[in-house]
Image (cartoon, grey):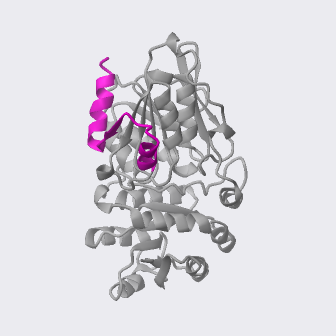
Amino acid sequence: MAIKVMIVDDSAVVRQVMLDTLSKASDIVVIGSAPDPIFAREKMEKEWPDVIVLDIEMPRMDGLTFLKKIMAERPTPVVICSSLTEKGAEITMQALSAGALAIITKPSLGVRDFIQDSSADLLHAIRAASMARLQRLRTSTTPTSPASPLPIANHTSTGNGSATSIMQERMSSPKLSADAILQATAGQGTIQTTQKIIAIGTSTGGTQALESILPELPKTSPGIVIVQHMPEKFTATFAARLNSLSQIEVREAKSNDRILPGLALIAPGGKHMLVKRNGTQYHVDVIDGPMVSRHRPSVDVLFRSVANSAGRNAIGFILTGMGDDGARGLKELHDTGARTYAQDEASCVVFGMPKEAIKLDANDEIIALERIPDVIAKLSNR
């Protein structure tokens, strides 16, 4: 059955280009479009969509207000179309807090070319949103509880080029493995230290999952490295908000940051994060490079680097998310003797990445989200 989509944007150009793009997909049907939420709500009385594509800044009623009303009345998957500005980033975080599932960033100029170039990610966002289990998400009216962006986030400009060039890279590049960034060395030399490292990879629904885990951890927890698929301008804001909720320190990673007990480092959007070791000490490198498993940062890259540097001293978790990024990396961790976990289907927003890891026998245990903080806390007492 086709996914029914409603487009809500005050730009006639955006509405038409999205309509043209989505009309080419056999599994998606646009049941309506509207220049503002009030017109949209009238149309939705006749036929309710499976997914809403929603602008933020509109006349009569802004998108954030409309989103909150929809989530209170009849929770529906929402993909936000947001401007890539500091103000847009803050409003977007509020939208995630209110229950939005996905973010498509758009520039102030060249919208037609941008949306056409990013059509693959728009389609992916809608399809993933239609699969999400909204009952697994907790929404909040406060700005400190963001919900769950999907892995469509690398629309942002990085040192490698413009947003449009990144879109073209995603669409045209082959699906690369972690070999494109580093070779596997099977945890060579890990006998020198017994310091534990926790590696977490997640995507769709991951921000909610991380908010369930990190605030529950004691300051004595082992050092944590995290890849959450998220746009470049949002990872620092997300890390700061997690930091405000947690006993441990949480921040966006920078090259040469040491991995220490009581510290969680989140990979910056648009960059790969690798764990390396110098003697008995671990640190991270944040680097450019091609997309791996069609993502940058990639969970596969992080997990391989942890397998190389920490081996059996690592603990790996693959959490809710669409696709298979991290499945092979978790298998590599498992094969070096690391303890590995895959989130169970019942607690996932999208049971994609954990499912693929389980298919590869990459996990020692399938674990419910609510059990993860206790598992990590026990490690801090060993």
Query: How many numbered tags mark residues here?
Result: 0
The x and y percentages for residue 196 are 43, 21
- Is residue 50 positioned above or below 139 on the image? below
- Residue depicted at 28% across the width and 60% down the height: 135
Q: Which residues are magenta?
A: 353-382
- Is residue 171 positioned above or below 368 on the image? below
The quadrant in which residue 183 appears is: top right
The x and y percentages for residue 364 are 37, 33
- Is residue 152 positioned above or below 9 on the image? above
Q: Nearer the viewer, residue 8 or 367?
A: 367
- Horizontal arrangement in the rendering, residue 144 relative to residue 84 (left or right): left
- Is residue 117 positioned above or below 143 on the image? below
**Residue 355 located within the stretch drawn in magenta:** yes
Q: Quadrant of the N terminus?
A: bottom left
- Residue depicted at 41% across the width and 46% down the height: 354
Q: Quadrant of the C terminus?
A: top left
- Horizontal arrangement in the rendering, residue 281 relative to residue 5 (left or right): right
- Residue 253 visible, this angle: no
- Residue 31 visible, this angle: yes
Q: Nearer the viewer, residue 256 or 128?
A: 128
**How would you classify the magenta stretch by its main secondary structure?**
helix
The x and y percentages for residue 339 are 40, 28
- Residue depicted at 32% across the width and 86% down the height: 45
